[in-house]
Image: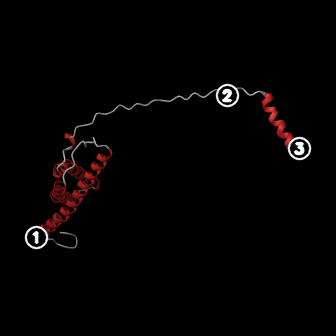
Amino acid sequence: SGPLRQYSAGARAASFFAKVAELSAVGALAGSVTSLAGSAAVSLRRQADPSFEPSTSVPDLQRSSGGLAAYFAANANVRYQLIGGLDRYLFNHASYMWMYMGMSGLARIASTSVGEMSRPWWQGMPSPSSIPSRPRTKRVSKRVHKRVPKARPVAAADVAAPAAASALAVSV
């Protein structure tokens, strides 16, 4: 139910499945673009450096597009619907606005954490914890000290001579 309309169970189910179809299409498009961009970046890098090997393999187009479509349709849509229901319940039943906002914020953070942990699996990518870390190189900083020769003291006669010459040029 909404403020201006009552929704039946059939209307809610139809809306859920319509959103599944929409998000599936968006996920397929995003997964395809991600896979194609990753493959293009690797091939460009290999042209510049033929010995280059990426730290993780780029998932193929079918797995990436299909996996992200399924992830958006099933995982993200269900999490979105659950957060929407929780928000509606909390807004109607919370005594204080800070309690509603705090609980809603915590639910959103938890939802994002769960989603980001499972997304690589859906796309056929390795989980972030299984990617081998590269050895860190030690950063070396060297200070360069430039030697500047000391200025020699200027004699009074050296300063007076140009001043006298300029005085003569003005009077002529």
Disc 2 target residue: 151
Mark 2 or mark 1: which is in front? 2
Distance of label 2 from label 3 (alpha carbons): 33 Å
Disc 3 target residue: 171
Mark 2 neighbour class, 10 Å CA radius: few under 14, some 14 to 19, many 20 or more: few
Residue sitting nearer the eye, 22 or 59: 59
Q: Provide the secondary structure element on which disc 1 rests.
A: helix
N-terminal of the two: label 2 or label 3?
Answer: 2
Q: What's under tag 2, amino acid-wise?
A: Ala
Picture quadrant of residue 86: bottom left
The spot of residue 17 in percent (x, y) is: 14, 66
Residue sitting nearer the eye, 134 or 118: 134
Q: What's under tag 1, amino acid-wise?
A: Gly
Q: Residue at x 38, y 32 (%)?
A: 139
Q: Residue at x 22, y 70 (%)?
A: 3
The spot of residue 108 in percent (x, y) is: 24, 53
N-terminal of the two: label 1 or label 3?
Answer: 1
Distance of label 1 from label 3 (alpha carbons): 107 Å
Q: What's under tag 3, amino acid-wise?
A: Ser
113 relative position to 171: left or right: left
Distance of label 2 from label 1 (alpha carbons): 92 Å
Q: Provide the secondary structure element on which disc 2 rests.
A: loop
Q: How many numbered marks have been drawn onto this rendered protein structure?
A: 3
**Is residue 160 shown above or below 17?**
above
Disc 1 target residue: 10
